[in-house]
């Protein structure tokens, strides 16, 4: 009976989104994941990490910031509210993916994975506040946001392709080189969080515990991994040319190289200018964009067939000469 159906099933029976709408919804989750990364950095760089003194409320007596908390309370609370916007965007993607026919369970699973990652990261964010910006928790908070961005990119990719068995476009050694690039880029991101935990921008004007490492030495290690990632990217581009790989992967490698070049310029500018907050914010944006490019390069080396833009049953019914659908015979009384 219809009344026993779950809400997503009821929506699926009344609304049929286009494949383009599902793709746009998936892309919106990627955009929101990047915004969450950047605004989270803005909270730290504006020394608003403890703008709300507790969690889940902003103060022990108020859910929202008070006038006495000033701009720091507004910034921290605003970042919390962005989580609600992110949940709405992910919810739209889940509903659109579920309502789309034929049903693609892989898309709905990826959508729910994003939702639970958001919920997990919200709890980690609360622990961050309750522990007074413990640098290790702060680092895990950023890595969880990067995990969300990863699943969002996977969702976007799956929304743009079919459901055939994946077919590799290059030989295994080339894939191994790509995975080495992905692993190096992931290590680069992790080391970047250590630089954050040991560096001067603690996230609050008060004295905050830092990771007991020389942040300049960790920064040098971070730079070393940048060179490794750049070297692997160049090597991959020449390799793809040598094996005559399709144009799309080679174009995406060039996009990654361009993004790495811009990120390198921003990195050196922030170092030689004494780590100004606005430049560090741009560096965090660049970090998210580099990771997106790395994932797109890896995902471009296999294909899963074309995406069906419409329901095959509806397409067949629209063909000239197709028989009219028959109504069910009336039951005799």
Image (spheres, rainbow, N blue to C red):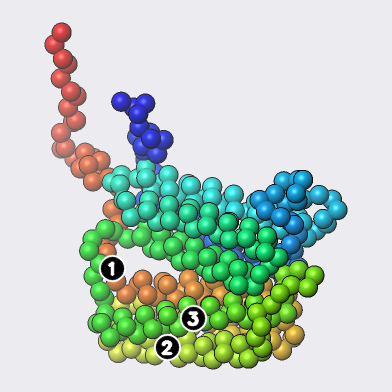
Near-viewer residue (280 or 262): 280
Near-viewer residue (55 or 79): 55
User: In this figure, which residue is indicated by the disc labeled 1?
Assistant: 303
User: In this figure, which residue is indicated by the disc labeled 2?
Assistant: 232
Q: Decide: marks 1, 2 in contact (CB < 8 A)?
A: no
Say if 267 sits above or below 24 in the image. Answer: below
Q: Is residue 276 left or right of residue 301?
A: right
Residue 278 in sight from this viewpoint = no
The residue located at (38%, 83%) in the rendering is 180
- SS of the residue under disc 3: helix
Residue 80 in sight from this viewpoint = yes
User: Could you say where residue 36 lies in the image, as x and y percent from the top left?
Assistant: 59, 61
Q: Decide: marks 3, 2 in contact (CB < 8 A)?
A: no
Where is residue 131, by image quadrant?
Answer: bottom right
Q: Badge 3 local density, few (<14 within 10 Å), some, or many (20+)?
A: some
Near-viewer residue (18 or 182): 182
User: Could you say where residue 144 lies in the image, as x and y percent from the top left?
Assistant: 52, 65
User: In this figure, which residue is indicated by the disc labeled 3?
Assistant: 187
């Amino acid at each position: 009976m219809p009344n026993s159906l779950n809400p997503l099933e009821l929506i699926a029976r009344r609304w049929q989104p286009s494949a383009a709408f599902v793709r746009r919804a998936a892309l919106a989750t990627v955009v929101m994941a990047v915004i969450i990364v950047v605004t989270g950095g803005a909270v730290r760089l504006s020394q608003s990490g403890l703008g709300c003194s507790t969690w889940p409320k902003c103060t022990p007596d108020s859910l929202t910031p008070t006038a006495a908390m000033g701009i720091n309370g507004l910034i921290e609370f605003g970042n919390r509210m962005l989580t609600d916007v992110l949940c709405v965007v992910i919810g739209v993607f889940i509903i659109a993916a579920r309502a789309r026919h034929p049903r693609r369970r892989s898309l709905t699973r990826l959508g729910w994975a994003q939702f639970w990652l958001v919920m997990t990261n919200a709890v980690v964010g609360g622990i961050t506040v309750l522990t007074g910006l413990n640098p290790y928790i702060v680092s895990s908070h950023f890595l969880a946001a990067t995990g969300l961005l990863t699943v969002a990119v996977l969702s976007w990719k799956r929304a743009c392709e079919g459901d055939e068995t994946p077919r590799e476009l290059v030989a295994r050694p080339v894939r191994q080189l790509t995975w080495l690039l992905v692993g190096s880029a992931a290590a680069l991101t992790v080391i970047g969080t250590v630089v954050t935990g040991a560096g001067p921008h603690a996230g609050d004007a008060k004295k905050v515990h830092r990771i007991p490492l020389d942040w300049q030495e960790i920064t040098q290690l971070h730079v070393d991994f940048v060179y490794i990632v750049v070297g692997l990217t160049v090597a991959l581009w020449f390799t793809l040319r040598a094996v005559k790989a399709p144009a799309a992967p080679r174009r995406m490698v060039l996009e990654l190289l361009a993004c790495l070049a811009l990120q390198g310029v921003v990195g050196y500018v922030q170092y030689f200018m004494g780590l100004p907050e606005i430049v560090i914010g741009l560096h965090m944006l660049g970090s998210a964009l580099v990771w997106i490019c790395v994932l797109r390069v890896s995902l471009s080396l296999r294909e899963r067939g074309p995406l069906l833009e419409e329901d095959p049953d509806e397409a067949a019914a629209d063909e000239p000469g197709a028989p009219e659908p028959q109504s069910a015979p009336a039951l005799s009384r």
